[in-house]
Structure formats: structure tokens, C-alpha cells
Image: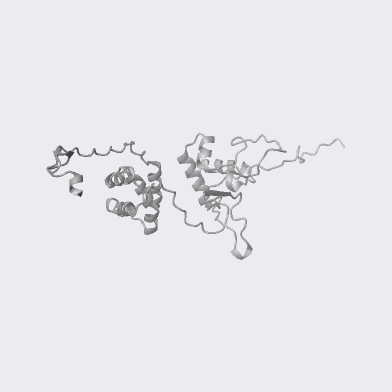
Amino acid sequence: MDTENPNARSRPQSRLPGKNHPGARPDSGVVHDSARHTENFTVIGNHLAQHEELSLLAIGLGCHIQSLPKGSPVGIKSLADRFPEGPTRIAAALRELEAHGYLRRTRERRPGGQVVTRTVFCNKPGHRAGPAEGPRRSARRPAPEKPPPRRRLPAVPQPASPSPDLLRAAVDVLAGLRRLDPRLLLSATDTEHLAPGVAAWMERDLPPSAVRRALTERLPAEPLTRPAALLAHRLTAQLPPPPPFRPPAPPAPEPRHPWQTCGTCDRVFRAPSPGRCRDCRTG
């Protein structure tokens, strides 16, 4: 009974080296010091944490949004206030999550007329697909449940007095932008949406040439996929202040006529030329 078995292992192995991780070396790579979570934790799939096409910022932002409770603000401004990355990088990361089906953003109008953005985060894109829809796509290219609707244009400033002549002049400004840059060719629907914003600029004592210059200067060199959205952003972000207050001009004083003597009763009265007084003319 005291004979040793030279073929028996000293202790069982939980995982063979390289079995689940080809190419992994026992003397390199990460080593996990794991503890079991029993509270205050979030389950995140590897299809997000190890996504092959998302940027690191998009993956981290997706994990953060998934860990938030329902109703938490996830707008660009609130996320930029929370993290050191600026609004531009955060907006780009949100677009990545939206393109890969993790995020859905729609604009809804409340009964009071206020327009709000509804954000839905999907922790596993494509999980609602049924058997009739065919095989699910791999986690590498998750697809949304249905094609996303056409994104609405951002709101633009509104003029205080939208007169027909002012709106017509604003439409002429927008229609002429394509002559300065062919990429700024706008549809009739986009022109109708942007015209009040141009009218708000012109209402602030800005000539059409100044509005054209503000909308066309320093455009990006790459192709413009949504030129109307770019113009809407500029009309809102670069809106000039109202002109300084100018008090109305005082009314012109009434003319002071010279004194005249009535040729009938010798009464003195003011008139631009000699003649008779009012009483003599009436009699």
C-alpha cells in the first residue's frame, strides 16, 4: 500500500494550457484575481466587452450605459460632464453603438408639444429575432431589429417675425449655397426646415452675404453625408446676438409758421403766407 504510482497526477488541472486560448503562454498575458460578486454588479456579454469593430471608448461607454438604472440621463452633455472625454468623442462613440445595434435613439413629441429623445440600450443586439427571420448573425456584426428610420434634422432658431418676404429671402440664401459648394445641394424638405434659422440670422441685421459666409467657411474636407444637419448645427451654434437696442427717433417738431395780419379784421395769426384769419374765412 505504500508503493507510489508514478503515473498519477499530483492534483487535477482545471484547464489545460492553450486549450481554450490558442497561442497563450503560461508565463505571459493577464492573470485574473477574481472575487464573486453578490451585489452591485452588472452582467456584460463578451460580444460587447471584446467587440472586434467597436473602439475602446465605445466599448467602455456601452458598459457604463448598461450599468445605469432605468431613467438615467445618457445624453451627450450629461456624459461629457461625467467623463473627461469631450462631446465630440462621446457623440462619435454613441454613433458606433447605434450603428452596431446596441443603442437606439428616437425623437418623440410629448402631448405638450415638447420634443424629447428616447434612448433604448440593447444588451444583446438581435436577441428578438425569431426563427422565421432566418439564422441570427454573429456577435461580430449585430444588426438592429429593423432598419433605422431617417434621422430628423436638429431644430433651428425661429425668427420673431416670420414675414413671407423674410422667409423668401432665406430660401434664396439656402438655394444659392450649392453654387459656392456643390456638396451643399439641399432638398426642398431640408430647405423648408432650415429657412426659419436663416431668417432668424437676417432678422438680427445680418445681410445675406454674411449668412452665406458663416455657413460655407471652414467646411470639412471629407464628403458631407448630411449637409442639412451640418447647416442646422451652424445656424444654432453660431447664432449671433441681437443687435443693440436703438431707441425710436423722436417725432419731428411741427413747423412754426410766421405771424401774419388778417387783411379783413387786422387779427394776428400764424400762417405760411399772408391772407385772412380762420374766423374771417369761415364767415
Q: Which residue occupies 63% across, 63% down?
A: 131
Locate residue 245: give its quadrant.
Answer: top left
Residue 269 position within the rendered picture, expressed as x and y whole percent measured from the top left = 18, 39
Outermost right residue: 1
Residue 53 visible to an observer of this rendering: no
Residue 198 position within the rendered picture, expressed as x and y whole percent measured from the top left = 35, 48
The foreground one among 40 and 135 is 40
Up/down of 64 relative to 229, above or below: above
Q: Which residue occupies 54% across, 59% down?
A: 146
Residue 55 position within the rendered picture, expressed as x and y whole percent measured from the top left = 50, 43
Residue 259 visible to an observer of this rendering: yes
The foreground one among 230 and 43 is 230
Left or right: residue 231 versus residue 281 is right
Q: Which residue occupies 58% across, 40% down?
A: 64
Residue 176 position within the rendered picture, expressed as x and y whole percent measured from the top left = 29, 53
Up/down of 5 relative to 282, above or below: above
The foreground one among 193 and 86 is 193
Left or right: residue 252 versus residue 193 is left
Outermost bottom residue: 132
